[in-house]
Image: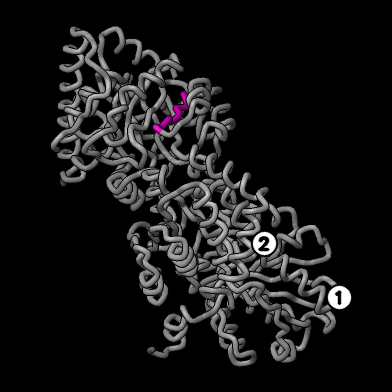
Amino acid sequence: MIRIERKFAELKKRGETALIPFVTAGDPDLETTLSIMRAMEKGGADLIELGIPFSDPTADGPTIQRSSQRALRNTLSLPRIFHLVREFRRRSELPVILFGYFNPFFHFGLKAFCRQAARAGADGILCVDLPPEESGELKRWADQEGMDVIFLLSPTSGADRVRQVARRGRGFVYYVSVTGVTGARRSFDTNLRTQVNHVRESTSLPVGVGFGISTPAQAAWIAQFADAAVVGSALIATIEKAKTGAQKARRAGLFVARLKRAMKRVKKEYNAQARPPDGEKYETGD
Amino acid sequence: MPALAELERAYAAARHDAAFRREFQKYLREYAGRETPLYFAERLTQKLGGAKIYLKREDLCHTGAHKINNTIGQILLARRMGKKRIIAETGAGQHGVATATVAARFGLPCEIFMGTEDVARQSLNVFRMKLLGAKMRVVDSGSRTLKDAMNEALRDWVTHVRTTYYLIGSVAGPHPYPMMVRDFQSVIGREARRQILKAEGRLPDYLVACVGGGSNSMGLFYPFVKDRKVKMLGVEAAGRGIRTGKHAASILGGEVGVLHGSKSYVLQDDQGQIRETHSVAAGLDYPGVGPELSYLRDRGRIEFVSATDGEAISALKFLAEVEGIISALESAHAIAAVMRLAPRLAKQRTIIVNLSGRGDKDMTTVGEYLGVKL
């Protein structure tokens, strides 16, 4: 929707990279999720990815699996998640992307899903197990409601796939930084920067990078060449250690603020300098 | 997705390659022990007092079930594709054993994903897999059964996609697996067709097979799909009864959904979350079913019925007593349906039932059910 586009344009003007934190709706309850979302906005989040829990999250590592299972212990429904988005939207213009798996959306009815999500104030849909060639129906309804359908690319995506996602995608292109599932990684492929640049050549959409980013240093590195960094598992791991809802929100806000600070600092230096050579090995000792 | 496209291309090339087909046939014959007999179960027929019953003896295959047909086909494909490592999911352990077996035969390292729940009730098969040199990857998430093992295998596959071949054991999962597994298992139906024509001079009136994911039923049914007069009966696991919600009958008790990359009937709740399943037969304990079976059911080509845990156990006992054959609990669901069907049919009618596996692996479970400690 217009909010995502506008947000990326605004960040570009300021010379910033978007920080997109991921949080599971309803982990451990929807009230806590709302306060976490608000705290993340205060901490400097630019967009929010709201995870729709699914019983069989095949693209997720252990941290987000645990998070989904906690959320599903309560009676959670899409209308209740829409209500959460509506509550958040009352006080915020931050773009919200619904991140989930196809079956719950399909079961709800794709038309109703897109309509109700859009009316609640959600801006985009990312359906991890729906390849672009099967996305026709979802896209039709999403387009009608002005919702962006965001697609994934990965290091194994061929030229055909890149072209297809560039053509069909809206909002931004989500580049999966590693072959594998979500979860913190110690290091990234040295070619990530080259890969991201390569994707950027085929699309006018912003390119975000996610899967595996867990520390401020990693986020800062990504900020040098991507338009957005998505951080999920590391954030969930931080939140799950806190006991009360208030503590969870506070931790989430602080963690997001640390990430954003690191990204801004590096971006400022980077923008001031000439481009360093590509293909450097990057590792952190987290 | 690129990995699936790569697999699709490799399989398309292999299935039209005479050398690949010859090699597949050779291993089916010399390694798996095909063809398997189509056995006229005379005493069972007499006792039930109706249609003539033939058993397709897949239980006599190497490793004790039909699963080996598909694993031979896929390992030859994996080798052709230059893959260096094999992974597979398993429920009852039969597919895991069949995968570990061919991996040993072709010298490829192999890891088997299996839910904690299934590891506990199929300890014999776990031991067999280890003896065959496979590494066990115990899955402790979700319902800790077949679907969770499949989730974890998929996660592993996307992580090591360039070097690893994922050997799926059922006609479920993303394309091209349902088609490929069906093709490799179709040897069951092709043999049965030839054998019944020889024995009876005509096609059977009924085909009966149990359905979890659906590989043994698709294998038997597929070569008969165009023979409109041959009726097909798929038997799902009713567990403790479909009304109790503790079952694994995806077609009879589920709704259309998308699971593991295919659109089919899926056991799910009112929010589209996948439901936990129950069956005494670990190999039927899956909340989805092959998409082609769903399609043939919707077209009215296959009729679906179910059998409960108790009916399956009784059928297993009955077959053991009257024919001297101990069937797998999965296949016993098909026998249970035959015990209801055969007496209603005239004596000149014929039924082929797929005895997809042998029961050795189930003795602990059956013992527990009957109150006997082994």
Picture coordinates of residue A112 (x, y %)? 54, 34
Element under disc 2: loop
Amino acid at circle 2: Ser
Which residue range is magenta in the image? A147-155
Q: Quadrant of residue A267?
A: top left
Packing grade of label 1 (10 A; few <14, some 14-19, many >=20) is few
Quarter of the image with the C terminus of chain B is bottom left
Picture coordinates of residue A13 (x, y %)? 29, 7
Q: Which residue is mark 2?
A: B186
Chain designation of label 1: B
Say above or below: A97 vs A64: above
Sequence-wise first label, 1 or 2? 2
Q: In 3D space, how far apart are the residues under numbered discs 1 and 2 (Cα atoms)?
A: 21 Å
Amino acid at circle 1: Gly
Question: Which residue is nearer to you in this view: B213 or A241?
Answer: B213
Packing grade of label 2 (10 A; few <14, some 14-19, many >=20) is many
Question: Which residue is nearer to you in this view: A36 or A262?
Answer: A262
- Picture residue at 67% right of the left edge, 61% below the top: B186
Q: Which residue is mark 1?
A: B201
Q: Is residue B309 magenta?
A: no
Picture coordinates of residue B330 (x, y %)? 55, 73
Element under disc 1: loop
Picture coordinates of residue A192 (x, y %)? 31, 27
Q: Is residue A147 visible?
A: no
Q: Is residue B7 left or right of residue A257?
A: right
- Picture residue at 17% right of the left edge, 28% below the top: A216
- Picture residue at 64% right of the left edge, 63% below the top: B25
Question: Which residue is nearer to you in this view: A58 or B160?
Answer: B160
Question: Which residue is nearer to you in this view: A232 or A81?
Answer: A232
Disc ID at residue A84: none
